[in-house]
Image (cartoon, coloured by chain):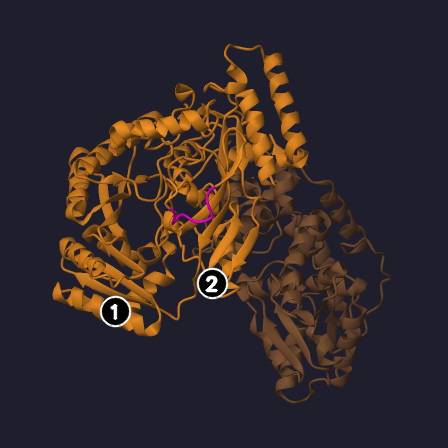
Chain colours: A brown, B orange
């Protein structure tokens, strides 16, 4: 079993209650089984042959928001998300997969994105200096951000192309379908190779992780950059002026991917501090402690109620703080917040930069 | 605790303990039993909705192990602790009331579960029946910024309540090690304490009033504050009752403004007795610190060295002060003067601040005590006159009767008249056989508890009694225990509430 590889995590976490408050799914369900402790405890009983997996285990493990708050809170850094991923692999191997997970997998494999949208493949194989990779969220529904990204690249005089389709494989990997993940990642890698770019600018932090971790095998010499790194750099070099925004008070949301997984908390704050008229405020729980919005492409499909609930906590705080908007560096968080339609808009920093 | 069961492939090992569902006075055939179980499930679903009643195996397992060493040891040995028949998640006081009324009709045990962080087995459903999880009762009802009080439902996790208060510049000043996992109801039920209790008190001093669902389902409220002379303070009947006298569903507490300053200092005494004398003098000076934490020589060496990276011999003490800057300065001066009079070495603020920063680190694996070792926290409170004798009495009794067993302790909650000893025993290599291990575990506890009582200590100060110490309640209370038994009989005539805990013996009692 794959969970055998995480035995040490299971052994240490099975009786430890210290991160209960951090767990996004346990905070939503209020059910003991969703806590990292109980997940480890139940896995221990499977690992030790005391029982087999059941369908209810699948429900719990696939509901995990993959927010990494448990790992962040753990003084010893036990990698609970890795334990959950291993459990999902085992559950998938014995066919205990919730229906929504099954459909999500099919959508990614058939359409290249988790939304099941058959986007026309647009050729990005022209040789270029910079290849811009929006990721599935912005490719399918991120027109405004992509307009601004293109505007930025033009302004900087980059010879660029946008790679509109392709999945980095992260949702499949998180769900335990490693072979599928490798397949789609290789497909993406081959399209990137065709473009022969020397720079890959990535707009989604989850995809960025996939590139930086080597899950998408890139040709040597390709420099992978998060789009905000480019923005921060040109702002610092005064090659770009902040926009003439009307005065705006925005709350800075630290996404699970950019924050807890990449450890990047400073970038968005640095960019916002360079924009005249924008006042950046902090959530009560920020940086490593920030709440998960429940808006990952997995959570939105597999645990939509949890997603709505998690987003509402953040949006309510933003409203109470009198903010004009939320700034987030994750396209999934942005989309999820905006889908709640509660009168507070979420922005990618690019949207404020070139308003 | 009922004997554990050897696991089978589906975790459905035969049940040995008598379930009210199964026994009902006589042996029922399996169809009748199944029928009763299904009927009870239907009625529970009618009260809280099907989504809030669970019979799923993973849920039943999750609620069968708390922080008590015994079920942990069993699971580690591939044995099943007893499991409930149902887990229910009420969302309102009314639902709690209806569940208890139903449980009375069916004569089914109800075990209330908050965070499951208790170390005494208080939340374990040893007689099966219903586990009532309170965590959906998690609303902060009102923060009264005029009176400095908060009213909350009791299923809220303490960390969430603290965050809600912090947002408005307040704090409950209740920082137990279980801060991030315990519920408000859980620490009320166990007379809980936090690391700053020396200044702000234990939970029984923080509580103003509460709403309780009695075992019969009747909902009552205590008076709006306890500083009255209209008879006994009813809050104190339910604080520490460990779910045996009802379910606390709402509570109003005193809160505090966040302090202007919070500082810590540390001292090293040549031995424990000097440290104890210093702590007593500080408390009697009434320049009350937020915390005094005094480690014995063994713990100073073994734990403080490992976690705080300090290579020192002696008895290490952390002293903290907080509040208004000007007052704190005076208190610090008094405290330091007392320590210096007793020839302490002033280690400066750094080690104290480091302790505050790492105060919960001791409870995370691998820093905490964990299997395969056997361990227990005795947690004894006594007056200053007796506290040193209690410490040395327990230490001598355990170390002499159980060679190879380590005894360590620190003193972490102080009063103007005495202190609490957080004493622990550790057996590095307990017997592998679960029954033998349990017998050894019980023998060590018996020796320790009796030594504590013989020297004037009370077991215990803030962990509660649960299953672990239930058998000692009668000895500890003497004739006064009849008062607790009488309360139990009167309030819970069918003995449904958390049977077997606190020495209030479930079926034997009813």
Snapshot quadrant of residue B219? top right
State which quadrant residue B240 falls in. Answer: top left
The residue positioned farthest toward the front in the image shown: B230
Q: Is residue B226 magenta?
A: yes
Q: Determine whether, in the image, residue B252 is placed left or right of residue B401.
A: right
Which chain's residue wears label 1? B
**Which mark identifies residue B170?**
2
Residue at x-position 55% and y-position 25% = B103
Residue receiving disc 1: B332
Protein chain holding label 2: B
Residue that sits furthest to the right in the current view: A120
| Image quarter (top left, top right, bottom left or bottom right) of the C terminus of chain A | bottom right
Residue B298 picture location, percent across and down: 21, 51
Q: Which label sits in the foreground, 2 or 1?
A: 2
Magenta stretch, main secondary structure class: loop
Frontmost residue, B138 versus B409: B138
Total marks in image: 2
Residue at left offset 15%, top offset 44%: B389
Separation of residues labelled 2 and 1 (CA atoms):
24 Å
Q: Quadrant of the N terminus of chain A?
A: top right
Q: Which residues are magenta?
A: B222-228
Q: Secondary structure at mark 1?
A: helix
């Amino acid at each position: 079993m794959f969970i055998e590889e995480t035995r040490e995590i299971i052994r240490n976490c099975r009786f430890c209650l210290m991160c209960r408050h951090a767990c996004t799914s346990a905070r939503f369900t209020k059910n003991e089984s969703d806590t990292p402790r109980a997940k480890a405890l139940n896995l221990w009983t499977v690992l030790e042959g005391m029982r087999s997996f059941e369908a209810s285990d699948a429900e719990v493990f696939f509901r995990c928001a993959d927010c990494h708050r448990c790992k962040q809170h753990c003084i010893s850094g036990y990698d609970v998300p890795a334990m959950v991923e291993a459990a999902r692999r085992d559950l998938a191997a014995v066919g205990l997969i919730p229906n929504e997970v099954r459909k999500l997998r099919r959508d990614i494999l058939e359409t290249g994105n988790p939304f099941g949208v058959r986007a026309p493949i647009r050729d990005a194989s022209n040789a270029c200096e910079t290849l811009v990779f929006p990721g599935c969220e912005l490719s399918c529904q991120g027109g405004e951000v992509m307009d601004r990204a293109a505007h930025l690249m033009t302004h900087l005089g980059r010879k660029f192309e946008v790679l509109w389709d392709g999945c980095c494989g992260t949702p499949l990997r998180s769900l335990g379908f490693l072979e599928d993940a490798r397949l789609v990642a290789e497909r993406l890698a081959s399209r990137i190779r065709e473009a022969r770019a020397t720079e890959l600018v990535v707009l989604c932090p989850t995809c960025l992780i996939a590139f930086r971790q080597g899950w998408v095998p890139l040709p040597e010499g390709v420099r992978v950059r998060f789009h905000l790194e480019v923005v921060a750099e040109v702002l610092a070099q005064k090659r770009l002026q902040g926009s003439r925004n009307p005065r705006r008070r925005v709350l800075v949301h630290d996404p699970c991917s950019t924050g807890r997984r990449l450890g990047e908390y400073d970038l968005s704050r640095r960019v916002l501090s360079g924009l005249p008229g924008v006042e950046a405020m902090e959530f009560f729980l920020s940086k490593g402690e920030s709440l998960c919005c429940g808006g990952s492409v997995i959570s939105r499909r597999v645990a939509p109620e949890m997603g709505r609930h998690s987003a509402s906590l953040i949006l309510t705080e933003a409203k109470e703080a009198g903010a004009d908007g939320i700034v987030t560096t994750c396209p999934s968080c942005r989309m999820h917040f905006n889908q709640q339609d509660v009168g507070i808009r979420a922005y990618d920093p690019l949207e404020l930069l070139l308003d | 605790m009922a004997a554990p069961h050897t696991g089978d492939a589906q975790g459905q090992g035969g049940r040995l303990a008598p379930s009210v569902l199964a026994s009902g006075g006589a042996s029922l055939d399996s169809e009748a039993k199944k029928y009763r179980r299904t009927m009870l499930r239907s009625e529970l679903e009618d009260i809280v909705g099907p989504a809030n009643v669970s019979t799923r195996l993973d849920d039943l397992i999750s609620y069968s192990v708390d922080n008590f060493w015994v079920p942990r040891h069993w699971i580690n040995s591939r044995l099943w602790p007893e499991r409930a028949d149902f887990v229910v998640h009420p969302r309102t006081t009314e639902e709690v009331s209806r569940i208890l009324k139903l449980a009375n009709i069916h004569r089914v045990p109800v075990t209330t579960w908050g965070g499951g962080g208790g170390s005494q087995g208080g939340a374990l459903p040893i007689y099966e029946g219903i586990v009532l999880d309170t965590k959906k009762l998690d609303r902060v009802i009102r923060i009264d910024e005029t009176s400095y009080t908060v009213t909350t439902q009791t299923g809220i996790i303490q960390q969430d309540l603290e965050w809600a208060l912090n947002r408005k510049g307040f704090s409950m000043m209740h920082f137990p090690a279980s801060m991030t996992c315990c519920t408000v109801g859980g620490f009320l039920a166990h007379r809980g304490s936090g690391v700053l209790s020396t200044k702000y008190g234990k939970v029984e001093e923080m509580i103003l009033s509460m709403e309780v669902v009695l075992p019969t389902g009747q909902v009552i409220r205590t008076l709006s504050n306890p500083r009255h002379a209209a008879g006994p303070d009813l809050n104190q009947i339910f604080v520490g009752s460990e779910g045996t006298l009802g379910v606390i569903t709402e509570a109003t507490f005193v809160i505090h403004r966040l302090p202007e300053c919070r500082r810590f200092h540390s001292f090293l005494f040549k031995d424990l007795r000097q440290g104890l004398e210093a702590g007593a003098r500080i408390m009697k000076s009434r320049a009350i610190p937020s915390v005094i934490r005094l480690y014995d020589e063994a713990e100073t060496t073994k734990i403080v060295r490992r976690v705080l990276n300090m290579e020192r011999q002696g008895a290490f003490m952390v002293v903290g002060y907080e509040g208004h800057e000007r007052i704190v300065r005076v208190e610090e001066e008094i405290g330091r003067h007392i320590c210096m009079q007793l020839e302490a070495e002033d280690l400066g603020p750094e080690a104290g601040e480091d302790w505050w920063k790492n105060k919960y680190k001791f409870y995370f694996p691998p820093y905490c005590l964990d299997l395969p070792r056997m361990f227990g926290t005795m947690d004894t409170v006594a007056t200053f006159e007796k506290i040193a004798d209690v410490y040395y009495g327990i230490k001598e009794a355990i170390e002499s009767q159980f060679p190879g067993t380590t005894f360590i302790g620190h003193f972490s909650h102080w009063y103007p008249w005495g202190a609490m000893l957080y004493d622990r025993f550790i057996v590095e290599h307990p017997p592998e056989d679960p029954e033998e291990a349990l017998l050894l575990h019980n023998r060590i506890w018996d020796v320790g508890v009796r030594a504590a009582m013989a020297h004037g200590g009370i077991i215990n100060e803030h962990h509660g009694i649960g299953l672990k110490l239930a058998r000692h309640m009668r000895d500890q209370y003497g004739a006064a225990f009849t008062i607790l038994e009488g309360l139990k009989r009167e309030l819970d005539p069918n003995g449904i509430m958390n049977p077997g805990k606190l020495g209030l013996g479930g079926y034997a009692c009813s």
